Image: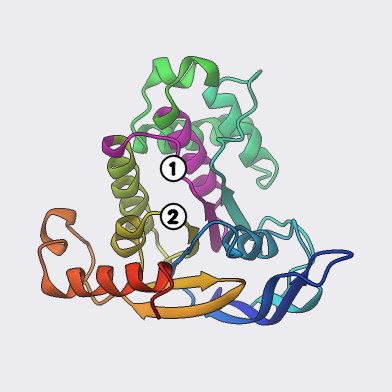
Amino acid sequence: MSTLYFENIDVKYEKTDHYALKDLNLTIQSGQIVSLIGPSGCGKSTTLNLASGLLSPTSGTVKIEDSEITGPGLDRGVVFQSYSLFPWMTVLENITFALKQKSKEPKDVITQKAIRILEKVGLNEKAQKSFPSALSGGMQQRVAIARMFILDAPVFLMDEPFSAVDEITRNQLQDLLLKLWEEGETKKTVLVVTHNIDEAIFLSDRVVVLHDGQIQQDIAIPFKRPRNRFNIDQEEAYTKIRRELLKTISGEY
């Protein structure tokens, strides 16, 4: 089990009266994908940074099950908007280096695991031997996703993971993420920060709207998995949910 809890969270900027988050209470059940959306500066990335352990709350508690988060840890995999790959390492070396931080298995076993996950995300031998600078943004993000999955943390945190790529690549990466998530022996608990309403609906079990550091809306997404983007956006429920989210984000609540 890997339920993620934000309990009575305040995050206050130093030497000001402004709160990035105020009295935030949010539970992400084990195995759920939840997206945070809202206007810039609403507290989305602050919330994710609390979960990653890169930021501590002014008051309140963030925890996975009964374990309080006090810093970064191997129980959380993170994908940022920037790909966070070591530029002096090849793609394969980036993945094996990450796995060596967690696994005590022999080098050849680690290498074979890395090759398998890279093949799963569509990166062939030539790409595996390349340095990140030789890859497109979409291919680099495939590496970042592969790294997150191979570390097999129970909680995944994703901050605008597909915002730097074109729409076609974005759709491909969304499909890839869900495919790997659905194939897992145990479903990961996933928190996604995004500005894209359609992405939030397609990926998520719930979509949470933040505004001025507080939750304004928490909508359950009713569509069954696996999802087909060419079907669900034709459903009446999709149009209704999208309209509700747009109104809330626009301040018409």
Residue at 54% in and 30% down: 111
Pick the front one: 251 or 225: 251
Element carrying mark 1: loop
Query: Magenta stretch: residue 67 in it?
Result: no
Q: Badge 2 is on which residue?
A: 195
Q: Which residue is pictured at 25% across the width and 77% down the height? A: 222
Rate crowding at label 2 as few (under 14), some (14 to 19) or many (20 or more) other CA atoms within 10 Å: some
Frontmost residue, 169 versus 11: 11
Identify the residue under disc 1.
163
Of pointers 1 and 2, the one earlier in the residue sequence: 1
Question: Can you say which quadrant of the picture contains the N terminus?
Answer: bottom right
Farthest residue in the right direction?
A: 15
Q: Would you say residue 153 is visible in this rendering?
A: yes
Left or right, 2 with respect to 21, comes to left
Q: Position of residue 170 (x, y in %)?
A: 33, 41
Quick check: 44 above or below 161? below
Q: Residues within 10 Å of mark 1 (few under 14, many from 20)?
A: some
The residue type indicated by label 1 comes to Ser
Task: Please provide the residue range marked out in magenta.
Answer: 139-168
* Quadrant, the C terminus: bottom left
